Every structure is written in C-alpha cells, then in structure tokens.
Image: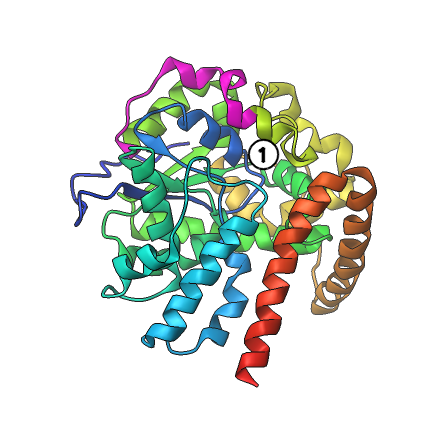
C-alpha cells in the first residue's frame, strides 16, 4: 500500500553536502531488515545496523542541561560508545566523539542531533547521498527529527499485526506478553498514521505482504521516494555479505540471507491460539481495516487495567526466562546482546553516582 507523494520537491536539503536523512518506522519485526539489506545494494544509499536509541532515552535526564559543553560532550561520548557496544558494528567506519561534537556544538542540541551526525559521517564515508536509520521505534520522536532536518523522510512499513506480533512474541526485543506487544503495535501505528496524515509528502507507506508478492514493484517505489536508482541486484539478497553475517549471528535474523516465503504470511495461524488472534484483532481492528487486512474473529475481547498490570508482571518473569534460555541455546547472541545491556546499565550507575 503506497501513498501518492512527491517527496523531494517541497523539502530541499538545507545542507546538500550531507546525505539526506530517512527513518524507517514504526515498530520492529516488520520485515525491516529484508528491505534495508536490499536497499544497501545501491551505492547511493547507506543504512547500517540501527542504534535503537529509544533504549538510551531513559538515561537522557541524567545528562542535565545540554547547553553545557561538558554535559553535551559526555553525551556524545556515551552515544558513540553505544554504537561500539552494539552487536553489529558499522563496517569501515570509525567515529570520533571530538569531531562529532565540533560539528554539531553550534546547532540545536539534542541526542537526535548526535545520532544523526554519526549516521551522516558514516554515510559520507560510504559516499552515499541518502542514509536511513532503521530504529523504527523512533517514530515517537518524529516531530523532533523534523524540527532538526527539513528534508527528513519516513518509510512506514506495515505488516499484518497477527503475523508481526507473533514474531515479536518470539523475540527478545519487546515484552513477553501478547497483550503488551499488541498495545505496543497499536501505539506505534497510531503514531505512524498520524505522521503520514500530517506530513503526507514526507511519508511513504508500504505493506510487507505486498513486498513479498512483488519485490520489484515495492522496491522501485521506495527507491523513487528516496531519490535513488533501482537496481536488479536488490532482488538477490543471497549476494549480500551483510545478510550472510547477520543470519549467523542470531536466530531472529536466520532468514535474512534467503528469499521471503509467501506461504509464511499466514504462519501465525499455527503459532497463535484463536483467543490470542481475537485479542490482537480487537485492539488493532481499526488499523487492520485501514490497511486492508481481513479479520478472522469478531474481535470483542475485553481488556482491563488489571489485565495490563498482570501482563506486565508476567512479562518480567518471561524476560528473565528468555535471557536464560538464550544463554543456553544461543550463547553468542546472548553475549553480544548482554554486552549492550551491560553498557547501558553501567552508564546508568555512573550517571546516578555523579548526580549523587
């Protein structure tokens, strides 16, 4: 599903020397890696493994007044450190906190200015004219990004909520309860649709199911939106060295080096109970109708505050169990993800001690 738009004519880049910024939205496990890896076949385009800066945001108040150079430079150092602690490094890119600080110190200050300067520098290193951040959860900071960059565009990737939430349930990136993950999905798509309605020229909406059925047509529309040339090489992801590397790092990415299987579109019917499908369809009914997904149930599940409270408790228990299972079954994936989690925990301890 694409929205008619002429994205570039009304929002020229204020600084043409840097790549044009794009953000993929609104929530993970939508097939985002499949799209990113294929677009990266373009020499004009660069999108590395995302920072997912949303996980850093709870620490931000600890840095205090960012107009203070000491505070802002410390934030730059720590965000650059986050990339170093992330399980997939940016190939051929070395980020210098001093250079980043000098580049942005006289501009409006924010954590978004830092993360995007990092991406701009990495994109310039790869001689790209377009960069994309795949930190989909940053949809909730879209207005801040638009205020910083008047040429910011958004790729809104929609996937059947039943399939996507089923995938999220098996991942270690969100909650460990289907109710909470469904609420996350709905909130993200609330934000994505609101953004598309407010800034129709900045947002291109595609459905993952349409991509599976016709990769060429969807990729061509995305390339046109981003202002890059489509290449037939994008259709053979097996040639991507990055895809092969990712597929061996985590079970979450095991299928990234192969073609998507159309039959898997309805795979959720085997992994979800009818009650779980009804819960998802109850909460996401309006979005399902808007994006053209047919419901299987009447969707009349009643959700109460006490159910949400219980779900949060169960999710915390599930998270502990999931980390322990990953440690046994996928030790390398566990160690890499744990290193990032430990880095964030270390920063929180340090910042709390400094404040005290």
- Circle 1 packing at 10 Å, graded few (<14), some (14-19), many (20+), is few
Residue 334 placement (x, y as % from top left):
72, 45
Q: Is residue 228 magenta?
A: yes
Q: Is residue 25 left or right of residue 252?
A: left
Q: Which residue is mark 1?
A: 294
The residue lying toward the viewer, choosing from 160 and 177, is: 177
In the image, which residues are magenta? 226-243
Report whether residue 143 is seen.
no
Q: Residue at x 62, y 66 (%)?
A: 346
Residue 107 placement (x, y as % from top left):
24, 63
Quadrant assignment for the N terminus: top left
Q: Is residue 328 above or below residue 233?
A: below
Residue 307 placement (x, y as % from top left):
74, 63
Q: Is residue 102 above or below residue 71?
A: above
Q: Could you tell me what secondary structure mostly forms the magenta stretch?
A: helix
For the rendered model, the colour scheme is: rainbow
Q: Residue at x 65, y 52 (%)?
A: 339
The residue lying toward the viewer, choosing from 72 and 15, is: 72
Q: Is residue 67 above or below residue 219?
A: below
Q: Secondary structure at mark 1?
A: loop
Q: Residue at x 67, y 43 (%)?
A: 298
Residue 279 placement (x, y as % from top left):
70, 49
Callout count: 1
Q: Is residue 32 magenta?
A: no
Report whether residue 219 is seen.
yes
Q: Is residue 119 left or right of residue 50?
A: left
């Amino acid at each position: 599903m694409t929205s008619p738009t002429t994205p570039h004519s009304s929002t020229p880049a204020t600084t043409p020397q840097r790549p044009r910024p794009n953000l993929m939205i609104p929530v993970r496990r939508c097939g985002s890696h499949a799209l990113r890896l294929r677009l990266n076949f373009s020499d004009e385009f660069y999108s590395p493994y995302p920072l997912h800066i949303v996980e850093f945001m709870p620490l931000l108040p600890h840095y205090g007044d960012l107009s203070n150079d000491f505070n802002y430079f410390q934030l730059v150092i720590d965000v650059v450190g986050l990339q170093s602690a992330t399980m997939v490094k940016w190939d051929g890119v070395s980020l210098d906190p001093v250079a980043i600080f000098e580049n942005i110190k006289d501009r409006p200050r924010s954590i978004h200015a830092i993360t995007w300067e990092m991406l701009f520098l990495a994109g310039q290193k790869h001689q790209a004219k377009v960069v994309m951040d795949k930190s989909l959860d940053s949809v909730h900071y879209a207005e801040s990004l638009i205020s910083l960059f008047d040429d910011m565009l958004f790729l809104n990737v929609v996937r059947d909520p039943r399939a996507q939430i089923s995938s999220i349930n098996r991942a270690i990136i969100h909650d460990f309860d289907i109710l909470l993950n469904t609420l996350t999905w709905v909130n993200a798509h609330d934000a994505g649709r609101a953004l598309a309605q407010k800034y129709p020229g900045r947002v291109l909406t595609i459905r993952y199911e349409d991509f599976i059925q016709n990769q060429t047509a969807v990729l061509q529309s995305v390339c046109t939106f981003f202002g890059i040339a489509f290449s037939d090489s994008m259709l053979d992801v097996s040639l991507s060295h990055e895809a092969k590397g990712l597929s061996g790092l985590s079970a979450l990415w095991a299928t990234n080096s192969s073609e998507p299987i159309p039959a898997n579109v309805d795979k959720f019917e085997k992994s979800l109970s009818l009650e779980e499908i009804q819960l998802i369809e109850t909460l996401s009914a309006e979005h399902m109708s808007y994006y053209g997904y047919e419901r299987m149930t009447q969707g009349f599940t009643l959700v109460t505050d006490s159910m949400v409270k219980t779900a949060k408790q169960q999710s915390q228990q599930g998270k502990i169990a999931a980390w322990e299972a990953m440690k046994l079954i996928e030790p390398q994936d566990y160690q890499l993800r744990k290193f990032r989690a430990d880095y964030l925990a270390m920063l929180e301890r340090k910042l709390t001690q400094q404040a005290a």
